[in-house]
Image (cartoon, rainbow, N blue to C red):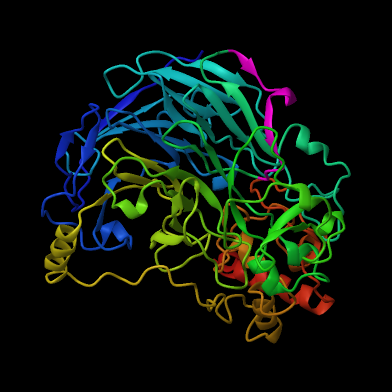
Amino acid sequence: MKALAAVTIAVALAVQGCRNGEHRQDAGGGTQTAAAPARDCAPDNGGLTLPDGFCATVFADSLGHARHMAVAPNGVVYVNTWSGKYYGNDKPHAGGFLVALRDTGKDGRADQIVRFGDSVQSGGAGGTGIAVYHGHVYAEEKDKILKYPLGEGLAPSGGAEVVVQGLPLTGDHPMHPFAIDSAGGLYVDLGSATNACQLKNRIAGSPGHRPCTELETRGGIWRYDANRTGQRFSPAERYATGIRNADGIAVDPNGKTVYATQHGRDQLFENWPKLYSQAEGASQPAEELLVIERGGEYGWPECYFDTAAQKLVLAPEYGGDGGKAIGPCAGKKGPLAWFPAHWAPLALTVTSGRQFPSHYGGGIFIAFHGSWNRAPAPQQGYNVVFQPMDGGKPSGKYEIFADGFAGGVKDPGQAEHRPAGVAFGPDGSLYISDDVRGRIWRVSYRGEAAMASRTRAESTSAPAVSQGAPAAKPAMPPEGINPNAGESPVVAQGDSVFHGLAGGATCVGCHGADAKGTPLGPDLTDDQWLWSDGSLAGIEATIAKGVPAPKEHTGVMPPMGGATLTKEQLHAVAAYVYALGGARRRG
């Protein structure tokens, strides 16, 4: 066990916000919250757009790469933060990766923050999964799930115990989100190491492994006992299979039904251009909401959920023909509900408490991190969606509940914020976390009072900036940024290839529309080269050969970027990338 490292920070966030509702005890002793009295709400809801009657405050900010959250019965919010390759190996915050937050002023803003658990100095890297169960906070840290005893203070009252260890850390999806049911069943997502279990991961035309032995240790849900310590990972604890990446996982308020989201696979067009158009690659396959059952087989990698056919169809790596053949997919378990392609569901929670209107009762909120694989089409997602439910089944189409996280540009490299976690507090307020700048919002229902309050505030405030518009094609790089480029038509052609207007390339998906990088691919404007000497010939050779094993980022680059480029287009896009760094070379 590692020593507890806790640092207490008193914070006062200078943000105007709405105030907490009045509390009352229900017959069972639990705390419920009525719609709040008429108090002013921030005109812009901390940058979010919400349905009428709802109000958001910035509960906390700059926490690090905030991922999943759990809220204790006393209202203390616990959040796990992450670091490493997924975030470009940027410098982590000081102190522990786990954070506890409390609002003692009852104004919707945390004024006490405590960091605890492993830190960079102790060899930690943080994680995604976190839960509160039977007086302990459980948290993912690298290959382990630990539990810390809770006391009266914010920080745990003792050191951590290892609940399970040896969880896989390699490949495309090294995170371990989890949920705990009322009996102590600990359900852990072990996402796939690959995109589609190909012989060569993410390489065009590469067939799938037969059988996909990866499923023995990945691509499913494993079940352990939250009441025990010292457990070790093994294939024997596999509970459900065929789930590519269940980042979102939660148990309903009754503590019995386990829900999970499935990230649909990537790169149908890039890897199989003879079967899928670029538009189909952007709109296929669906993201899924699943009910997790013991022994359930949900289809990955042989199958994907086709948004047009609205059923599981055979994947091209296993003999699929572009969406018609079904084969073994007829015997797999389909989703409870489905959502647009590549939105990236990162967390889910079931409505808890009675604060929100009855329309939201029993429904599910899903945080969509936002797409990268829709390029060159506009990226989508970057929102929180509500799925109405009745009796455990969908009762209507999904609704966008909260938007505006990304700011003016929905792009993985330029988004101001990206939703990463959702959790309800005991008073029925909804917390939403962001893993770009480490912000947490607290969303509460105010009814007509909120609308009237906001109208008063807006009459004396500047109008909020429009949020969430897709990025227009940028003017980068300006002609002449490289002295050898001048008004070169070659660079202009490369600009078109880079931005997906020619050759079928999707460079912006990994490198961003401004080429300044995303968690998937490096910044191409900083003149730091990992795979060549930065010369035009070196860049061209790297694009032609691809990058099957990235050094500092998570996105594999297939040869030719996964596109069917001509020699002319290859040279042009290499010249464009070379021109991007020209100003640095001159300066």
516 or 145, which lies in front? 145
- Residue 380 falls left or right of residue 404: right
Pick the front one: 441 or 476: 441
Image position of 404 with respect to 135: above or below = below
**As drawn, is 223 to the left or to the right of 171?**
left
The part of the image, by quadrant, that contains residue 501 is bottom right
84 w.r.t. 402: above or below: above
Residue at 72% in and 61% down: 267
In the image, residue 387 lies at what x, y percent? 46, 55
| Residue nearest the observer in this picture, 343 or 559 | 343
Point out residue 125 in the picture as x, y percentages from the top left corner: 53, 32
Q: Is residue 191 above or below residue 330?
A: above
Can residue 465 be seen here? Answer: yes
Q: Quadrant of residue 229?
A: top right
Work out whether residue 105 can be spotted.
Answer: no
Residue 384 place in picture, x, y as percent: 43, 55
Q: Quadrant of the C terminus?
A: bottom right
Asked whether residue 238 is drawn in magenta, I would say yes
Name the residue nearer the viewer: 382 or 341: 341
Q: Residue at x 68, y 37 (%)?
A: 220
**Can you give x and y, in whole percent of width and height, for residue 199 in the image?**
86, 48
What residue lies at 74% left-to-right and 63% top-to-bottom?
268
Question: Which residue range is magenta in the image?
Answer: 230-244
- Residue pictured at 62% horizontal, 16% vertical: 231
Residue 354 is covered by the magenta coloring: no
